[in-house]
């Protein structure tokens, strides 16, 4: 192993070497994106623990040059990746990369500010407010969702954080009315299509696991919650002396549906329709997350407008400076092949499909064929998809949302599916 000069070890951010090393990293990533389709989408032939053995047991005592580090990445890291930016990645909702995103992340990391309160970096706080207002405008949200209308928002690092913060606000709003002991009676409702982070969030904020209601959906309801389903569950719990707390209005990551129970939930005293409510600086959201230690108080900012302290809008104290045709074609291709069926009508970029049941084949055998088909597609390294179980049926999910995905990649994955289906069940 090589070693870095002592000066570099003592002063890790040297502007001269920083520029050279950053250029090397950017060049490495540019080559990676140029060659990304050469990599198998999923890391082939990997077993849990096998990759860890490639790396030393102890941390190195001296550093290495950036060239050596990038050689290690090429040799030891890239072969173990699932390549999310590969155009044939269809497994989960995408985390897309872009040139603008890279530039913004580099600026954010380089400026390296931590704007948890306004005075810690005024422009970071106010620029985020501007961007949130822009987003609300692009989405066509009413003015009450914007800072100019008395609302506002915050850029979270994950869905789970947004869910936890929303549920904490709903919990504290109920506690303010009913007392702390009431938390043992609070109930959260979700459909069997709701993202699992909602259940995790309920546990984190102290909702008893037995009080998390998973409400069944059906094909007849388009795999969305109905007002009748929510009403029956809420009325039963109220009769038992329980406190309905929250229903997720959106967040169905498993099938492309959104629940349709908002109107009933609002009329039934449910505290929160997580996570879509506008936030105000004096709202239950910020009240539930606010702290005000003396060392964070601002004693000299002045001005006519009270500043926003984003530490009161999130879990963590610190924060970063953050400021259709493809899936339609795929769905039509699935419908046109009599061996396949679309299980639930497509909304947005998620298509849920499966091999059809055939005469003389029971449900377990059909599920087995679909499992076999998905495994074969993923093992090929040419594409990556995931599955879900709906109404006891094994369903394959294709989420087409990659920034680098073109029509040819969607056609390629369809040809791959047909090829593997031919190997499994035959047909043309």
Image (cartoon, grey):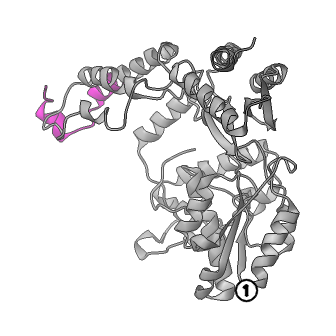
Residue 225 forms part of the magenta stretch: no
Report x, y in % for residue 147.
Answer: 71, 58
For residue 304, side relative to residue 247 (left or right): left
Looking at the figure, which quarter contains the C terminus? top right
Residue sitting at 56 percent across and 28 percent down? 375
For residue 381, side relative to residue 78 (left or right): right
Pick the residue in front: 182 or 279: 182
Looking at the figure, which quarter contains the N terminus? top left
Residue for badge 1: 241
Pick the residue in front: 127 or 279: 279
| Total numbered labels placed on residues in the image | 1
Helix, strand or loop at disc 1? loop
In the depicted structure, whether residue 310 falls above or below residue 92: below
Residue 16 visible in the current orientation: yes
Q: What stretch is highlighted in magenta?
A: 1-22
For residue 184, side relative to residue 259 (left or right): left
In the depicted structure, whether residue 157 falls above or below residue 78: below
Q: In which quarter of the image is residue 368?
A: top right
Q: How many residues crowd mark 1 within 10 Å: few (<14), some (14–19), many (20+)? A: few
For residue 93, side relative to residue 52 (left or right): right
Q: In which quarter of the image is residue 75?
A: top left
Report x, y in % for residue 188.
Answer: 68, 69
Report x, y in % for residue 224.
Answer: 80, 52
Residue 308 visible in the current orientation: no
């Amino acid at each position: 192993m090589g070693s870095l000069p002592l000066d570099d070890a003592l002063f890790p951010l040297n502007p001269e070497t920083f520029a050279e090393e950053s250029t090397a990293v950017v060049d490495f990533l540019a080559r990676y994106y140029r060659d990304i389709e050469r990599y198998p989408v999923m890391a082939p032939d990997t077993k849990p623990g096998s990759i860890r053995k490639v790396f030393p047991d102890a941390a190195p005592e001296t550093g290495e040059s950036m060239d050596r580090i990038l050689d290690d990445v090429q040799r030891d890291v890239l072969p173990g990746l699932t390549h999310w930016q590969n155009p044939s990645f269809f497994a989960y909702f995408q985390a897309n990369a872009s040139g603008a995103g890279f530039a913004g992340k580099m600026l954010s990391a380089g400026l390296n500010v931590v704007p948890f309160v306004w005075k810690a970096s005024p422009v970071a706080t106010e620029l985020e407010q501007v961007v949130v207002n822009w987003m609300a405008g692009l989405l066509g949200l009413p003015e009450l969702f914007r800072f100019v209308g008395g609302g506002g928002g915050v850029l979270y690092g994950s869905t789970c954080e947004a869910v936890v913060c929303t549920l904490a606000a709903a919990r504290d709003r109920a506690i303010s009315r009913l007392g702390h002991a009431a938390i043992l009676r609070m109930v959260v409702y979700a459909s069997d299509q709701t993202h699992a982070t909602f259940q995790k969030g309920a546990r984190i904020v102290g909702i008893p696991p037995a009080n998390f209601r998973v409400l069944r959906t059906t094909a007849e309801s388009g795999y969305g919650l109905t007002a009748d389903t929510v009403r029956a569950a809420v009325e039963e719990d109220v009769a038992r002396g329980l406190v309905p707390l929250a229903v997720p209005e959106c967040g169905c990551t498993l099938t492309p549906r959104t629940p349709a129970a908002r109107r009933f939930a609002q009329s039934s005293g449910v505290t929160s329709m997580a996570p879509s409510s506008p936030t105000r600086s004096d709202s239950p959201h910020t009240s539930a997350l606010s702290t005000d230690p003396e060392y964070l108080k601002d004693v000299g900012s002045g001005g006519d407008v009270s500043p926003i302290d984003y530490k009161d809008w999130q879990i963590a104290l610190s924060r970063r400076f953050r400021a259709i045709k493809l899936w339609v074609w795929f769905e039509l291709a699935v419908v046109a092949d009599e061996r396949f069926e679309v299980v639930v009508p497509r909304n947005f970029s998620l298509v849920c499909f499966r091999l059809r049941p055939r005469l003389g084949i029971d449900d377990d055998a059909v599920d087995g064929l679909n499992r076999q088909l998905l495994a074969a597609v993923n093992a090929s390294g040419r594409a990556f998809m995931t599955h879900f179980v709906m109404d006891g049926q094994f369903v394959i999910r294709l989420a087409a949302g990659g920034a680098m995905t073109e029509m040819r990649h969607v056609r390629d994955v369809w040809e791959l599916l047909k090829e593997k289906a031919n190997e499994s069940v035959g047909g043309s």
